[in-house]
Amino acid sequence: MFCCISEHEKSQKTRSREIDKKLNKDRLTFRRTVRVLLLGAGESGKSTFLKQMRIIHGQEFDDDQVREYRTVIYNNILKGMRVLIDARQKLSIPWEDESCVKDAATVFDFSGSTKLDQSMFCDYVDSLKKLWKDSGIRTAFDRRREFQLVRKFNTAFHIHSQVSGPINYIPSKQDILLARKATKGVIEHQIMIKGVPFMFIDVGGQRSQRQKWFQCFEGITSILFLASASEFDQVLMEDRKTNRLVESCNIFETIINNRSFASVSIILFLNKMDLLQEKVAAVDLSQYFPEFKGDPRSLEDVKNFLCDLFDSRRRERAKPLFHHFTTAIDTENIKHVFQDVKDTILHDNLRTLMFQ
């Protein structure tokens, strides 16, 4: 059976081989770190991408980190259930079983600032199971696009499988990728990739965290801007009215047109394509973006519109906008995409990154 390779793929592979040869030849003269800044609105997938970089390049999570992520996952589950309980009430969805009121109160006793260990989480398990079985909570979950729910609840790894697991639960790599912990401040993580030092800089995407972005701008080699492509029908948690995709476009416009980044490679990741594919089958994009004239059930039409939406925000048209469609929780997808991204970054910056 023959395997057809596009001209673009051939070109990418050729360029990748050329860069690898150059790096092997001049490895000892490579002195400057490649500084990659991850930007985007809250919950766009920046931290998940950074976790993928660790997994793909062999930096394992140690036992303490795994235990920390277990605590994060427990917090995600309880916070998520609190969101569903609150949404059920605000959406006027009745309980199927009125006795769930007591279980809801038990869950609401949980303080989001509390660090849950295994035994503490077990105190909530029975209430969580009962609530998850109630049709009122399930109906609220089905209407989750009307409010903001952590992705932990948007996957096949739902609460019932999590709380029914073994007592000595050890998060898998996939569980760690799905765990949601808001980034506060600036997180730097260095990874050696084929002998080249890459420093990934992750900063919080919530509005309250964005003033910290400016302290990270100096010496940046490249910016990876992540936008959640599936959030075209959702609003910000901060004000409950601003469309999340519009917010991402506005941030992108500020970054892409900043003169300070004239010589910086800026690459757009339209992320959460798995969720977008599900959403396109159920939600009409034109209800939220009337300028969309394509087929609302066509994933390709929607993807093309999203690309144009971000591309239209650029004032400088001399150089192309590189973009990728990604699913940050899919390791193979990110591995493939980052190969192209790495080559683009090194190709554009090899002269400045190496002593001549």
Image (spheres, rainbow, N blue to C red):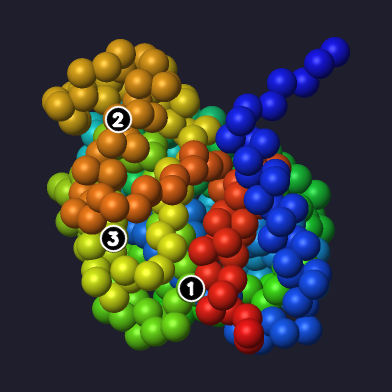
- Provide residue 232's location: percent of width, then percent of height: 29, 37
Residue, disc 2: 305
Amino acid tagged 3: Ile
Q: Residue at x 67, y 77 (%)?
A: 197
Residue to which mark 1 is pinned: 221
Query: Which amino acid is tagged 2?
Result: Phe
Q: Where residue 182 sits in the image (x, y, percent)?
A: 45, 66
Residue drawn at x 69%, y 52% as measured from the top left: 16
Using the numbered discs, state the Cα–Cα distance from disc 2 to disc 1 in whole angstroms.
29 Å
In this picture, is 328 found above or below 342?
above
**What residue did someone put label 3 on?**
256
Judge from the rendering whether residue 147 lies leftward or rightward of residue 327; answer left or right.
left
Q: Residues within 10 Å of mark 3 (few under 14, many from 20)?
A: many
Dot 1 crowding, Cα within 10 Å, few <14, some 14–19, many 20+: many
Q: Quadrant of the C terminus?
A: bottom right
Q: Nearer the viewer, mark 2 or mark 1?
A: 1
Q: CA distance from mark 3 to mark 2?
A: 19 Å
Q: Earlier in the sequence, mark 2 or mark 1?
A: 1
